[in-house]
Image (tube, rainbow, N blue to C red):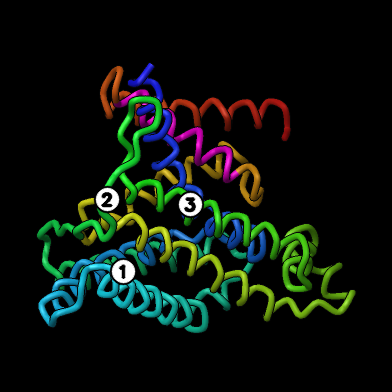
Amino acid sequence: METFIQLVFTGLQIGAVYVLFSLGLTLIFGVMKVVNFAHGQFFTMTALLIAVILPFFTAAGLSVLPAYILAVLIGIGASLVFGLILYQGGLRFFQRDLEGSFILTVGVVMLMEGIFLHYFGGVVRAVPPFIEGSVNFLGVNITMQRILLIIVSMVFTIILYRVLGSTKIGKAMRAVSIDHEAAMLQGVQYKKIAFAGFMIATFLGALAGAIMAPLAMISPTVGSDYLVKGFIAVIIGGLGSVPGAIVGSLFIGMIESFGGFFYDPSIANIAMFALVMITLLVRIVTGK
């Protein structure tokens, strides 16, 4: 029983990161109808900057928690600036253009990974936990760091739901995702909504990197791993579907947790890709 609870909680923790990540992918696709392969670079940039900046702050005399908060603000801020440059300098010219956006964002991935490798090196970095202690739940010790990760993911997921369901800009995003031309005829300023959706998605990707940094080994290519899992989650849940992205992410987290424990991480990955192929085949056959 204890093993089962531990695996469920591990699956929730993994899935919580994928939820934030895949929500960004889903939001961009829903509003702009493009697939942003550079989404993982927001994750990587934030996590890398935290790993590099945090030691400087702690060496200057700051305790770990204030130093981590400052590093997170700098990392997310840098990712938002990068997202702004990417949108204004490229993606705004390829909205609703799958081929053009694919070529652009794949090129950005190759460029940014080269830059990260050049300036940060290929060494794997670790970020120390900023909250110590654990909670005993039904005989299973769960670290406060992992509990906080899940809470942060839940809070921002709920906030996004509220924004999309109850605010003017959220309703405009939903209208654009359904029919952007009809939305524009009703007075919705599509370019502003697309920009807002992209920046929110950028923030979610950067936030995922920030909360995962203390729990993962950070490298210049770490975002690409999460990009693949994020795409698997949104394909299973349905591109453009926010509830689908959440369910798909949690499902992938559980497969990774249980499959990695009972079999092997490689078997879990094979199962994920097999599930994607089955999902796509079923949709082709059913026409959905």
Q: Nearer the viewer, residue 104 or 146?
A: 146
Q: Of the two numbered discs 3 and 1 on the same chain, state the one appearing first in sequence.
A: 1
Q: Position of residue 103 (x, y in %)?
A: 44, 64
Whole-angstrom CA distance, mark 2 to mark 1, is: 16 Å
Instruction: Confirm whether the magenta stretch covers residue 254.
Output: yes
In which quadrant of the rendered image does the C terminus lie? top right
**Where are the magenta residues, as a range?**
245-260
User: Which element carries disc 1, helix, strand or loop?
Assistant: helix
Q: Secondary structure at mark 2?
A: helix
| Residue 169 shows up from this direction | yes
Amino acid type shown at disc 2? Leu
Amino acid on which disc 3 is placed? Ile
**Residue at image coords 55%, 57%:** 155
The tag on residue 161 is none
| Residue at position x 13%, y 82% in the image | 60
The correct choice, above or below, for 74 with respect to 16 in the image is below
Amino acid under disc 1: Met
Q: Residue furthest right?
A: 186
Q: Position of residue 180 (x, y in %)?
A: 78, 67
Task: Evaluate if marks 3 and 1 touch, with contact meaning CB atoms under 8 Å apart.
Answer: no
**Residue at left offset 58%, top offset 32%:** 280
- In percent of width and height, residue 14 lies at 39, 42
Of badges 2 and 3, nearer the viewer stands 3
The mark nearer the N terminus, 2 or 1, is 1
In this image, 73 relative to 89: left or right? Answer: left
| Mark 3 lies on residue | 151
